[in-house]
């Protein structure tokens, strides 16, 4: 964890340790060390004079394979990502960095992946390909062999007034042409006919993805962000999130996340590492 | 109901009639009349030779105050709205037409309004003012005297890379300057800190709206549409929707809506008429 001054982050790591799924390296000021000792966390400690240095040490430690997940503590996301993208540490693999959320709704019998509601603001078509590839990598690590990817929009028909629907259709076709591999992509689909076989049947939307999507790809960060947060704040479900595309998963939890949600995100990072 | 050939629509009207909250006028082909009689619906009937004529008759009937809610049956939304916007029938009041959804989440103790996830594709700042005004009218009719309006975005800070956050901030300021009246507007807010006092406190977002929003105003149709549908397909909650801004509410239900949801939308239209 880069920025060990994050008290909530320390608590989340304590829970992770109690689950027995990770060893902890803290990077931060000498004061933060005492805080971590106080709550009974076991850890290796690396002192850093400021958050920028902490971020670079974090990237170095992961680049040298001494750690396998990079976690944001009390440090700005931009500072952490700058270190991740710095070529001298070797975390950058030439792939797009994107945010993948794993969501659990109380009324769905499977986990869903959602991207990108946390990283790429308004992806181009090319970036959407990268978003799909990253999400597919995550889905496979979670045991979904051939993920069904729905590029969702407000409607399930191509509407020239909604460029999002054209891009969704293009992504589906790129998948048929072998330009996006290892998954089945369809779109545009509405959220209803992506998730519900009934809704897909009523609207006569056919194919493998309709009603059975594993991955939801959204047009922009706002729509994805609302959808992810709706799982927690409207559905009472669960969400975990991680930034993928670098050589190691980057866990960026929000201050407002519950301790439970932070634990899930760290666990997801570990599962992907 | 314009386009009485809509069998699911007829069933929904039957439920409405059983609730004793409306009288029914059907506009459509002579065959549709028999269908309606078969299910035991009581109704006044006006024959129309095609869906365009049906739409114009519907607008006329509402314009003459013989009906108080216009409902879409088996007719294209565009055909129905063309008649609503035709100046010769007097339904147009010079206000923006926008879609307002009322959502009930299983984990929230109040109804939420959401706009616009169904009508205005990518509203300008000016159109967002109209969207807020329409939503406030609906909120007041539902008994919320001074609605708290949250202009939501992926983040609760103004980010120059996200014009949606600038517009949200501008709308909040326009409200303070008296350019948007009868409500309290704040933004940008995340969905989390709009709905949860805990999330607002953690992120130190203050004000009347944070944690207690009555109305969620979204940047575009996709983000609003996902959020509305998430209530049904991820949260197992309820949604009703209506198009407002004309002299009478226009109920546009989707084929894939459940019978229950259709009933709620018609009831909402009646409550607003």
Image: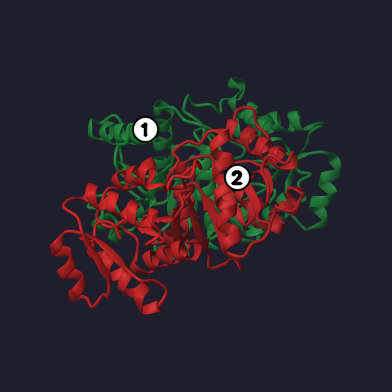
Chain colours: A green, B red
Spatial separation of the CA atoms under disc 1 and disc 2: 23 Å
Q: Depth-wise, is mark 1 or mark 2 nearer the camera?
A: 1
Quadrant in which residue B6 is drawn: bottom left
Q: Residues within 10 Å of mark 1 (few under 14, many from 20)?
A: few
Percent coordinates x, y for residue A92 in the rendering:
53, 26
Q: Chain of mark 2?
A: B
**Image quarter in which the N terminus of chain A is found:** top right
In the image, residue A37 above or below residue A155: below
> Which residue is outermost to the top?
A88
Judging by the rendered image, the residue that carries numbered circle 2 is B152
Q: Residues within 10 Å of mark 2 (few under 14, many from 20)?
A: many
Quadrant in which residue B264 is drawn: bottom left
Q: Is label 1 in a helix, a strand or a loop?
A: loop
Judging by the rendered image, the residue that carries numbered circle 1 is A161
Percent coordinates x, y for residue B162 in the rendering:
59, 31
Residue at 39% from the left image edge and 37% from the top image edge: A132
Percent coordinates x, y for residue B192 in the rendering:
63, 52
**In the foreground, B52 or B216:** B52
* Residue A27 visible in this rendered orientation of the protein: yes
């Amino acid at each position: 964890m880069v920025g060990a001054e994050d008290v909530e982050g320390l608590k989340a790591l304590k829970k992770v340790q109690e689950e027995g799924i990770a060893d902890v390296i803290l990077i931060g000021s000498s004061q933060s060390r005492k805080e971590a000792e106080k709550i009974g966390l076991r850890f290796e400690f690396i002192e850093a004079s400021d958050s920028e240095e902490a971020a670079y040490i974090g990237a170095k430690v992961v680049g040298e394979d001494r750690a396998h997940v990079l976690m944001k503590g009390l440090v700005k996301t931009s500072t952490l990502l700058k270190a991740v993208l710095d070529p001298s540490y070797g975390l950058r693999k030439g792939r797009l960095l994107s945010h993948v959320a794993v969501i659990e709704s109380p009324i769905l019998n499977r986990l869903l992946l959602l991207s990108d509601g946390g990283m790429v603001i308004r992806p181009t078509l090319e970036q959407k390909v990268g978003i799909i590839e990253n999400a597919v990598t995550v889905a496979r690590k979670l045991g979904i062999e051939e993920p069904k990817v729905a590029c969702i929009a407000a409607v399930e028909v191509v509407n020239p007034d909604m460029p999002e629907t054209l891009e969704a259709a293009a992504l589906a076709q790129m998948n048929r042409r072998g330009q996006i591999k290892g998954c089945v992509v369809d779109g545009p689909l509405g959220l209803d006919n992506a998730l519900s076989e009934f809704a897909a049947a009523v609207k006569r939307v056919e194919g493998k993805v309709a009603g059975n999507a594993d991955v939801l790809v959204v047009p922009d960060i706002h729509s994805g962000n609302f959808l992810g947060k709706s799982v927690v704040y409207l559905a009472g479900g669960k969400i975990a999130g991680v930034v993928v595309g670098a050589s190691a998963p980057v866990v960026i939890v929000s201050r407002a996340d519950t301790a439970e949600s932070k634990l899930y995100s760290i666990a997801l990072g570990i599962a992907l590492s």
